[in-house]
Image (tube, rainbow, N blue to C red):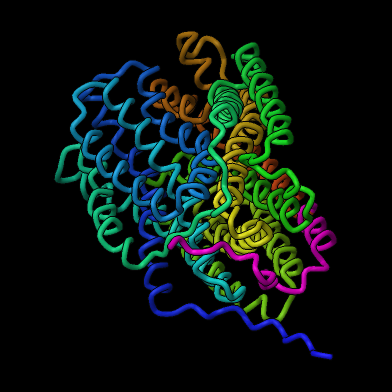
Amino acid sequence: MSLARPASPPARATVREWTGLAVIALPCMLYSMDLTVLNLAIPSITEDLKPTASQLLWIVDIYGFFVAGLLVTMGTLGDRIGRRRLLLIGALAFGVASVLAALSTSANMLIATRALLGVAGATLAPSTLSLIRNMFLDPAERTVAIGVWISSYSAGAVLGPVLGGVLLQFFPWGSVFLIGVPVMVLLLVLGPFLLPEYRDPDAGRLDLASAALSLGAVLAAIYGIKQIAEHGPDAVPALSIALGALGAALGWIFARRQGRLANPMIDLALFRLPAFAVSLAAYMLACFVMFGLFLYNAQYLQLVLGLSPLHAGLWSVPGAGAFIVGSMVVSALVRRMRPAYVMGGGLAVAALGFAMLVVLPESSAQGGLAWLVASAVISSLGLAPVFTLATDLVVGSAPPERAGVASAISETSSEFGGALGIAILGSIGAAIYRSTMADAVPAGLAGAAEVEAARSTLGGALALAGQIGGSAGAELLDAGRAALLHGLRLVAGICAAVLLIVAGLVAFRLRGAGQANAPAAPGAAALPER
């Protein structure tokens, strides 16, 4: 009678894999930078290209729309044609589109090139994350690698405004788009040597109908959500409801189709795995609170405390730095505690950070700036392990040959969470502001448009206060700041409550997970392309 040999431990990563991780992190950092530098260039673009209000909105939004809508399609495509191949194709397209965007001579041309950037950008997250899944077979090393991957986005968010500000100081607005060109050239040169190729050897053909349904469902839903966030739920009820219903209907048809296909884009059985479903929900809700409150933090720094955009951006660095630190200590924490307790504890710490904003002081003299920065540091330290481990669990629970689509689902959930946070929490804060300011702006102070603007936003109240001046202007400004702060405090309390509920869910539902990822079963790993 022969005894079965014990399963050999997963192979450890070599210098090639760790160097390849550094190359992978570059396009991720660039993706995050591209979302931030455009906002700085908007005034120059407006002066040069003279876009209409609608065109300006599409210049800003179309990149994110195409990224969100194509993530699942690109993740599935990478599993079929090869993840490295898709990443390099996307890098080439991103570099070309960046040059075209920089050379745009009209608003419509810039919209078109931004759309192409979104198509190319959709290849980056699923390709890079699924490559990490195959490059780092050891669960502990993979957790570290995903922590680096997550941190690269935070680094891009910090570097984007600084680098963009320097470029705009000395060069035309098109220079902000050229930041990505050398990064993509470096990826194209080093990628074939440092990144291995992986694909699903048994993958079928890409179902174009499923791809179209996926794109339509995500675009309709996110566009409807953004309409509510930008105009309020009462301004465009018919459009927002119709788009939401269309997105839900297309999503239902998409899910039904996946259940009937022999080679579906998404294996619906993944959602029955607790590690996958619960981690995905935690990731989405963490994005919900983080993006939803970020809007208020920026307004508090600039409109309440009176900081310039540059100084407000610099004061966001401690929070981003804390996020990077939190991402990098995850691997040490999961060696001592179960992932469920690390994630649950992180969510509880983040809830404490958000709860601090419930008693946020009204001015910098009262410690408002220090209190806000401390809150950002604490909440970032708590959320970073959640982002890292949730991503690790989502990708690790899927078979290696399906890592591309699992990565895409993870990133799509973060897009939905962020959009919902901005829409729902933004609408709550806007309703509180309007209710508080309804009687604080007498109709006789100025024209109807100015009065309505002051009753709608603190920026409008600030502009009207500057027009009327004197004690009346000062009282109006104080009322507007108090109204914004009231909304911020209430929204922060909602965020803290949501995080505590999610912390309990995660600790209970994932308590059986002994490691962040169990080693892959023998024979489960995807074969490298020969």
Q: Quadrant of residue 441?
A: top right
Q: Quadrant of residue 523?
A: bottom right
The answer to whether residue 437 is left or right of residue 160 is right
Q: Residue furthest front?
A: 1
Residue 71 magenta-drawn?
no
Q: Nearer the viewer, residue 516 or 346?
A: 516
Q: Nearer the viewer, residue 27 or 264?
A: 264
Specify the principal SS of the magenta part. loop
| Image location (x, y in percent) of residue 524 | 65, 65
Q: Nearer the viewer, residue 409 or 494?
A: 409
| Image location (x, y in percent) of residue 148 | 48, 66
| Image location (x, y in percent) of residue 254 | 66, 30
* Residue at image location 48% in from the left, 59% down from the top: 198
Please say whether residue 8 is visible from this viewpoint: yes
Looking at the picture, does residue 14 appear above or below residue 131? Answer: below
Looking at the picture, does residue 151 appear above or below residue 30? Answer: below
| Image location (x, y in percent) of residue 399 | 65, 58
Q: Which residues are magenta?
A: 501-530
- What is the total number of numbered labels drawn onto the structure image? 0
The answer to whether residue 500 is left or right of residue 376 is right
* Residue at image location 52% in from the left, 59% down from the top: 373
Looking at the picture, does residue 69 appear above or below residue 283? Answer: above
Q: Nearer the viewer, residue 249 or 311?
A: 249
* Residue at image location 64% in from the left, 44% down from the top: 288
Residue 508 magenta-drawn?
yes
Please say whether residue 383 is visible from this viewpoint: no
